[in-house]
């Protein structure tokens, strides 16, 4: 029976439409309405309330739209007890399992109240809480180029609570690369000393919301967007992690997934509205990574929909953000996580697969509430062919023309996957260093190239050390460029010790030392238990981070390319590149050499941002080889080496 009656307004109809029904249709409508209330056997059934999203809210925030889950909600009257909160709108699903309630909280005071649903058969109530917002000091601080991120796949980092490893119906097996391995939030908290000693100050963790599937250890197949997965701990564990990080002057970045949910989400079999998803489990598009179709004003609607409406990997149900109720649900969900945790920033998964209007509205609302919150979008389709022009199309701060909508996404920055591709080409695929120079020459396509989040790899790519021809020396050269060039660098957990790993899921091996019993004696968290190779890479990365953290030009400076050839590149970082050293502006010169011999670089400083520099202080590399004259600088750069010089 497909019932559609309810207190205020049905999703699929209105009283205005009904009053024009012919008499025989009106009789049918009345009979259906009665069945909705009393049931097929003539027995009235009282409403049942089983779940409310979001589970709580805050005063001084926008009025929330509640998604209520239950039974027999069609025809029910909803009210609020013991509060001056109001219900401004009611919509229920035809089967009576879902109700959308818009709360008016502008006059509400912090506290708890009862939400009541009543029909002729009875009433039921559900407790709800409006809390007072935290002081501004607890609000997000945002990440920027001053920071260095560290990406943690929670399940594969450290097991701090073995008691939560085995969950009903889930597969826990550390020998199975597709199963849950036991890493959790407490495990991260227990190793913050390691991260702080390394020199990173911002921790990005993969999604923490519930993924009740045997192989969803990664977190990208949510089954409840308002619960922390039991494998990872509790909401209290997550807020404790944020508190611990903030106490150290560190930051937290949450991974948010508005594009899709997991195939086991209850919505897949029972959606709150008929168009909650793009397509259905039985009939849907396969998501395609042809992002150029979104830029091309002449692209077919088919090609655009294959990106925006397709189910990712033909498995993950694609949310329909064009549905205003679904869009509001997703935006509210993000507000809830940020407010609950005081997270500082967001990583936005599968960014191009979601429409630009949604992202515009998403960022407008988030920025209104959390002015300093910053976001980084994943613009990646699994290939190395990601030119800067295409990547920049998704950046915020500018209205882009193309596709069907000209709009500013509001995104703080995309990841710099073009850099990821080129740095690997240059260091392990024998591409010329001029390819990196040409990449930097395209920075003008970005409204804010200094914000780009640069990376050598992630949980979605093969590990650097598993690339054919990779060596620890080449990895350290790549790290040297990553940590001295423009942007906000991110280090994938394990790269700082030279971990290997092929394609997914081999690139998600357990961090050595985070799990017991260990298969080997190494524990990368402890200096005395690192292998020789782990220690050499770790210590070199730590020195690079120490340099970056104490030289403000490397954190905040603009970048000027001054020279490149087949094997070398030279670039300058400075807070104000329009004025030379004579005006008191400091400069940092970075020289990189990918060849297997020492290269002596001679650079003419005339008509560059280094003009007027007369003094030098080598910060990294051979301190005795650097020579500065009134118009030029020369330095010997070691094979697969980096030289960094402070100029004044």
Image (cartoon, helix red, strand yellow):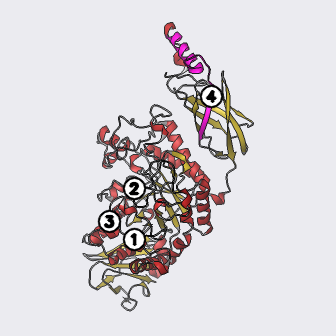
Which element type, helix, strand or loop, lies under badge 3?
Answer: helix
Direction from residue 249 to residue 400 in the image, left or right: left
Q: Earlier in the sequence, mark 1 or mark 4?
A: 4
Question: Looking at the image, is 416 positioned above or below residue 471?
Answer: above
Question: Looking at the image, is 44 positioned above or below residue 177?
Answer: above
Q: Earlier in the sequence, mark 4 or mark 2?
A: 4
| Residue carrying label 2 | 178
Circle on res. 482: 1
Which element type, helix, strand or loop, lies under badge 2?
Answer: loop
| Residue carrying label 4 | 47
Direction from residue 424 to residue 489 in the image, left or right: right
Inspect this view and state whether residue 68 appears.
Answer: yes
- The residue at the point 37 percent across, 43 percent down is 311
**Quick check: marks 1 and 2 in contact, CB under 8 Å?**
no
- Percent across and percent down for residue 353 are 39, 47
- Percent across and percent down for residue 234 are 59, 54
Q: Earlier in the sequence, mark 1 or mark 2?
A: 2
| Residue carrying label 3 | 439
Circle on res. 440: none
Question: Looking at the image, is 331 positioned above or below residue 153?
Answer: above
Q: Nearer the viewer, mark 4 or mark 3?
A: 4
Which element type, helix, strand or loop, lies under badge 4?
Answer: loop
Q: Earlier in the sequence, mark 4 or mark 3?
A: 4
Q: Residues within 10 Å of mark 1 (few under 14, many from 20)?
A: many
Q: CA distance from mark 1 to mark 3?
A: 14 Å
**Quick check: marks 1 and 4 in contact, CB under 8 Å?**
no
Q: Residues within 10 Å of mark 4 (few under 14, many from 20)?
A: many
């Amino acid at each position: 029976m497909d019932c559609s009656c309810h207190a205020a307004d049905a999703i699929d109809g209105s009283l205005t439409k009904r009053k024009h029904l012919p008499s025989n249709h009106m009789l049918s409508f009345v009979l259906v309405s009665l069945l909705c209330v009393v049931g097929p056997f003539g027995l009235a059934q009282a409403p049942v309330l089983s779940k409310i999203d979001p589970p709580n809210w805050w005063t001084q925030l926008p009025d929330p739209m509640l998604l209520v889950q239950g039974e027999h909600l069609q025809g029910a009257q909803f009210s609020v007890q013991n509060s001056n909160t109001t219900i401004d709108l009611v919509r229920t699903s035809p089967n009576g399992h879902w109700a959308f309630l818009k709360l008016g909280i502008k006059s509400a005071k912090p506290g708890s109240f009862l939400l009541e649903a009543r029909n002729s058969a009875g009433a039921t109530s559900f407790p709800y809480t409006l809390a007072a917002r935290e002081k501004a000091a607890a609000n997000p601080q945002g990440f920027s180029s001053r920071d260095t991120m560290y990406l943690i796949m929670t399940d594969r980092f450290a097991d701090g609570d073995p008691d939560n490893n085995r969950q009903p119906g889930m597969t826990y097996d550390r020998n199975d690369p597709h199963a849950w391995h036991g890493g959790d939030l407490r495990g991260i908290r227990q190793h913050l000393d390691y991260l702080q000693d390394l020199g990173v100050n911002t921790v990005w963790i993969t999604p923490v919301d519930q993924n009740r599937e045997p192989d969803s250890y990664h977190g990208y197949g949510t089954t409840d967007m308002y619960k922390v997965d039991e494998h990872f701990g509790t909401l209290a564990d997550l807020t404790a992690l944020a508190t611990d990080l903030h106490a150290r002057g560190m930051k937290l970045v949450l991974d948010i997934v508005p594009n899709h949910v997991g195939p086991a989400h209850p919505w897949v079999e029972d959606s709150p509205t008929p168009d909650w998803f793009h397509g259905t489990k039985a009939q849907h598009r396969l998501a395609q990574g042809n992002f150029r179709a979104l830029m091309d004003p002449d692209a077919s609607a088919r090609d655009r929909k294959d990106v925006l409406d397709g189910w990712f990997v033909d498995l993950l149900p694609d949310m329909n953000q064009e549905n205003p109720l679904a869009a509001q649900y997703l935006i509210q969900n993000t507000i809830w996580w940020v407010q609950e945790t005081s997270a500082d920033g967001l990583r936005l998964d599968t960014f191009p697969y979601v429409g630009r209007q949604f992202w515009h509205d998403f960022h407008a609302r988030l920025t209104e509430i959390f002015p300093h919150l910053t976001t980084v979008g994943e613009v990646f389709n699994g290939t190395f062919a990601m030119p800067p022009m295409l990547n920049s199309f998704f950046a915020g701060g500018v209205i882009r023309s193309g596709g069907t909508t000209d709009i500013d996404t509001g995104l703080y920055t995309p990841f710099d996957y073009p850099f990821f591709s080129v740095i690997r080409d240059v260091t392990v695929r024998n591409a010329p260093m001029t390819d990196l120079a040409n990449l930097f020459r395209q920075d003008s396509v970005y409204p804010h190239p200094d914000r780009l989040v640069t990376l050598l790899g992630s949980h979605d790519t093969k590990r650097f050390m598993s690339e054919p021809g990779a060596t620890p020396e080449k990895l350290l050269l790549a790290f040297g460029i990553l940590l001295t060039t423009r942007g906000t660098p991110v280090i994938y957990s394990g790269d700082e010790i030279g971990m290997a790993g092929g394609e997914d899921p081999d690139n998600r091996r357990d961090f050595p030392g985070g799990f017991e019993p260990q298969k080997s004696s190494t524990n990368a968290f402890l200096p005395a238990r690192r292998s020789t190779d782990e220690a050499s890479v770790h210590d070199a990365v730590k020195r690079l981070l120490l340099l970056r953290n104490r030289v403000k030009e490397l954190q905040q400076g603009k970048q000027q390319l001054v020279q490149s050839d087949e094997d070398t590149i030279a670039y300058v970082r400075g807070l104000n590149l329009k004025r030379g050293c004579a005006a008191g502006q400091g400069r940092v010169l970075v020289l990189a050499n990918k060849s297997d011999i020492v290269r002596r670089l001679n650079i003419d400083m005339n008509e560059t941002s280094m003009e007027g520099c007369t003094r030098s202080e080598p910060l990294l590399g051979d301190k005795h080889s650097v020579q500065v004259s009134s118009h030029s600088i020369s330095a010997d750069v070691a094979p697969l080496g980096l030289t960094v010089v402070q100029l004044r």
